[in-house]
Image (spheres, coloured by chain):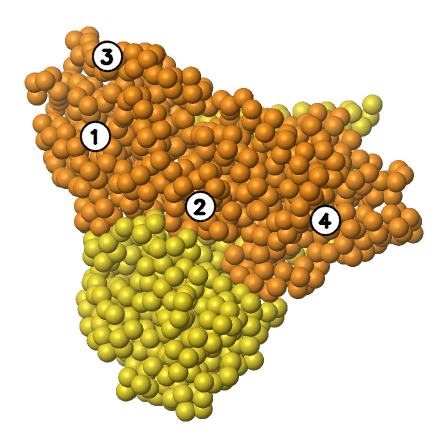
Chain colours: A yellow, B orange
Amino acid sequence: MTREKHDRMANAIRFLSMDAVQAANSGHPGLPMGAADIATVLFSKFLKFDPTTPKWADRDRFVLSAGHGSMLLYSLLYLTGYEDITIDEIKNFRQLGAKTAGHPEYGHAAGIETTTGPLGQGVANAVGMAMAERKLADEFTGDLVDHYTYALVGDGCLMEGISQEAISLAGHLKLNKLIVLWDDNKITIDGAVSLSDSTDQRARFEASGWATDAVDGHDPDAIAAAIEKAKSSDKPTMIACSTTIGFGAPTKAGTNSAHGSPLGPEEIAGTRAALGWSAEPFEVPSEILDDWRLVGLNAAKERINWKKRLEESSQKAEFERRMRGELPTGFVSAIADYKKQLVKDLPKVATRKASEMALNVINAALPETIGGSADLTGSNNTKTDQMAPITPDDFSGRYVYYGIREHGMAAAMNGMALHGGIIPYGGAFLIFSDYCRPSMRLASLMEIRNIFVMTHDSIGLGEDGPTHQPVEQLASLRAIPNHNVFRPADVTETAECWQLALESEKTPSTLALTRQGLPAVRKEYSQENMCAYGAYELATASDDAVVTLFASGSEVEIALAAREKLEANGHPTRVISVPCMELFEKQSPDYQKAILGEAQVRIAVEAAVRMSWDRFIGWDGDFIGMDSFGASAPIKDLYQHFGITAEAVVAAAEAKLHKDEA
Amino acid sequence: MTREKHDRMANAIRFLSMDAVQAANSGHPGLPMGAADIATVLFSKFLKFDPTTPKWADRDRFVLSAGHGSMLLYSLLYLTGYEDITIDEIKNFRQLGAKTAGHPEYGHAAGIETTTGPLGQGVANAVGMAMAERKLADEFTGDLVDHYTYALVGDGCLMEGISQEAISLAGHLKLNKLIVLWDDNKITIDGAVSLSDSTDQRARFEASGWATDAVDGHDPDAIAAAIEKAKSSDKPTMIACSTTIGFGAPTKAGTNSAHGSPLGPEEIAGTRAALGWSAEPFEVPSEILDDWRLVGLNAAKERINWKKRLEESSQKAEFERRMRGELPTGFVSAIADYKKQLVKDLPKVATRKASEMALNVINAALPETIGGSADLTGSNNTKTDQMAPITPDDFSGRYVYYGIREHGMAAAMNGMALHGGIIPYGGAFLIFSDYCRPSMRLASLMEIRNIFVMTHDSIGLGEDGPTHQPVEQLASLRAIPNHNVFRPADVTETAECWQLALESEKTPSTLALTRQGLPAVRKEYSQENMCAYGAYELATASDDAVVTLFASGSEVEIALAAREKLEANGHPTRVISVPCMELFEKQSPDYQKAILGEAQVRIAVEAAVRMSWDRFIGWDGDFIGMDSFGASAPIKDLYQHFGITAEAVVAAAEAKLHKDEA
């Protein structure tokens, strides 16, 4: 490609981007203009993709980690011929209902591999995608999976802590097909990077086991040579591409005023003059558009060969099932058989152990699960016998030692789920959901299946004390839209919750599990998954109920004990187990009304803060739980100390009953 | 000191630690045993402290970032003679009410400089402490402030992403009086560090602008030489101390089984034999205890000289006020004057702008505020005219460019607040409170004054879309115990909320502020701080109210507009402004009852999820707000699209009124 042609193609990105931002009167022109040369080289010379089949399983993944530069991606998708992104979508940038949201939104348009914007997430997703690629390449032979993962990152991505977790994991695992392109423009929103950072990024990546390179980010040959070299590295590679933010803008280029606001008509006119671009806004001269469309057509050729390989593969059916994300037949009956066994044995185990027991069944039935833990394997009970560790030199295993990197783990799991072919689950203490939260939120926003196994879910963890005792985490996770928070009460509920999590293709799940042992509260086999109701009557009242007790997880046992005493005292009492508030919200109003019931006294019991339970009990209801941080002590002392006991429930109920009588 | 004496002193730490863990039957013996030599050298040869005056302002700060090794710290405090940590407290390790919690809890005992346990937080706190030291050293002359900050970190601290934010900020700011001692024991909970990490930590720190060194962590002379060298470095220093976890334990030393469980009687007996320790559990031979107590006495001598300098200083009164954390006289009247002016001007501004206006008053009155932002200075409106930037070479300013490091910022702010003499505030978008959350939680747990300025607090931010639009963050922050979430509705409420945040010495605050302009809803001057009630009647009903509307922040305007229409339609309606739910929870039951009122219809309005409002409206109440993620579009379209309008409030109220009539 001549330099002139390259420049024209890159300028098409620049003008689409600045014109779209100007029309929207909001957005970020600086990055697309600065990184246009990098993107042009990558898409025209390297990227394996097919705009006509954007979900092609073996495409290279391109992640725009610096998501504010969304117009770079939209321009590329439009120019190379993705159907979803028309010129009208570009014109409609940042408007209600457009596929071209302010930041790239996964699911809005094919070609958007992940939702980015919160900085650092994309590069960590890319690590997960590269892990998935390597894992599937090991599992499926015959060259079905053999692609690269590219991420374009900005200074913000690299300053965010999550990037360190991601790059050190990638370096450790020797993810040599991961290539990070750093848009090294030396500018942040506040001004020069030197206002806030002096990191030698190449040295930092090298310390984390990466190869690095540095090029002029406006020199297409140099960029191409660096990517070529990176493709044959035995380590992941970071290429520092020195660029000018807002390249071409006469007065704003190289300054933070090009970053996050429209350039303005005058500056845009100046840029047109400077770069010799005479086309109207949103018009790409046909010759240039043709050049770009040819890129899209040429890139697609590889897919034909791949398709042949797939057709000839003995693993075709399984590969396609995995990439569709369908669970294997036999899964439902495996869970049913397991549940039948449980009501025979009625084991008294911690729900973290119950989770391990369920996982033994699940991991045998589902080859697509990849387990892991952020350095709490023995505590999270996430590693079953089926799971050998994945190591830097051997990806035949199914278990990842993520290290003390909760945030990086959650984001890598998102990347694996996005890649397809894998259902990731990963463990941490529930308290450390706070560390993973930005990635958990993105899983919810992206509507992907990702399962967070969060153990030690209350003061019940005991001596480690308030720094490790979640009290507000259940409420705060329940507040996230499209996120199912399961808190099972025993072995059977744990199995049911796992089943629901695995079957929720468009909703990520958190399983909140106990450290401490819990008795089996479900004594009869139920073919139906009772947890699917979110809340259900676990114990009925002997007569018209005067008290309804709501509880989840470890406090269901307490509610049941309280019910016995209340019944003995002549107060008919029912117990509602609430393993998943989100699913209860989805039930019919009639079902909800029946579950809430007519009892004059409603009490909720959970060893956590009250907030999410106000829905059930309102201002005047009674809540037996926490209203402060916990404390360091043995578990028994803590439940007594904080008054989370059957006696306290009984006392609260009777006080209310007597008050009503008075 | 002879090697023999050193070993005896270090062994005292080892045996107190393993015996306490054994007695508690839970805890982490491995780190205290492995790091005992490092700690002995640091405390006996370098640390400037006075056990009899543990809050001495110019003491060196020692942060045990690897908080699970709490018995190391408790042993040191006991041995050097801190009154709070008696041998009985050591015996009572991890029991209810003990000062010796599972992880070090700030406030439990003097000498615990910060609460640690969630890994990586401590080293980031230490960065903030070192920033505070340098700032105060610049501000207060005559050698009043001149101390070092030491942090002992483990592998977990260094794998957590927050550590990268912290060390790159420290390296950038050239915090040369910060010395990090890395307990490089090559073991994590899951096994060898090599299972999950291959980072060259020295190279990584050097890439971030640090000096580094590496020593045998069991060689006291080598440790001392490295610390000596670090003290004269012009950069922060990281010393990699190669250690054996569980040093001395015959079979468990050097393995992950020494990390987090009691060693067991047999292994402890073996350790006693191996290290030649014949004393009973919890008994420190008097000669050794004397040696340690002498360390405490000797270290204290420096304080006498410092005290003389203080007495002679012209800045004595101000220095003492600042270290006590008292606000200056004149603050209250400055706010009052400002509020009087506001009701004359009634400016229609975004609350982020109102915050800047309030800060102009505050920063003029309070020299102790240090502002900053995570690279959103112009958006967060956190920088006032009084605030020149702090730069690596000049700490005379009062503003920190934290870079794109929300988590590191929040933890550094915690460190500054803990150091004393400074009231930190820092800005980010509210959505990125998710990134800061673990540090915000610790601020709440530690009961320190720290102010998070979180702007762009709803879908009102518009085009940036759902990745940047908080919908669940208000609820999730309200769920944190001891954390005041303020969401002011106009300029006056913003000023009142700022006043409350600054006056809350034991509760951190989040100010949730709009991007968009809001009319002044408080038209009359009130000497009383109405926001102190948490919720108050902003507009009364014309007659006995049939509708009560609750709203916060930008939705108060909507509630007021709805009230006008409802009143016009003959439905007496009152509006309750709810700037701070936490403060409302603290009012008397009578006040709460009066605010909740008797109106048959209760509706809450907030452009966020419903959860925290259920307290006010219950299951059957109406909520006008969000039940999903937002969308990318101009603000007006979004409020219409999601139905957060006065019309929607009126329709909901009238539907309920008609239903009740039917």
Regarding residue A428, the answer to whether it shows in the image is: no
* Dot 2 amino acid type: Ser
Please report contact status of discs 4 and 2: CB closer than 8 Å, yes or no.
no
Please tell me which residue lies in front, B312 or A330.
B312
Same chain for mark 3 and mark 2? The answer is yes
Report x, y in % for residue A146: 29, 75
Classify residue B307 as left or right of residue B575. left
Check residue B557 in the rendering and tell me which mark sits there, or answer none: 4
Indicate which disc, 2 or 1, sits on the residue closer to the N terminus.
1
Kindly identify which residue carries mark 2. Answer: B373
Residue drawn at 49 percent across, 42 percent down: B384
Same chain for mark 4 and mark 2? The answer is yes
Closest to the camera, between mark 4 and mark 1, is 4
Check residue B35 in the rendering and tell me which mark sits there, or answer none: 1
Please tell me which residue lies in front, A108 or B348.
B348
Residue drawn at 61 percent across, 53 percent down: B516
Kindly identify which residue carries mark 3. Answer: B301
Label 1 crowding class (10 Å Cα cut-off): few <14, some 14-19, many 20+?
many
Element marked by disc 1: helix
Indicate which disc, 3 or 4, sits on the residue closer to the N terminus.
3
Report, in whole angstroms, how far the alpha carbon at label 3 lies from the one at label 2. 40 Å
Report x, y in % for residue A609: 57, 36
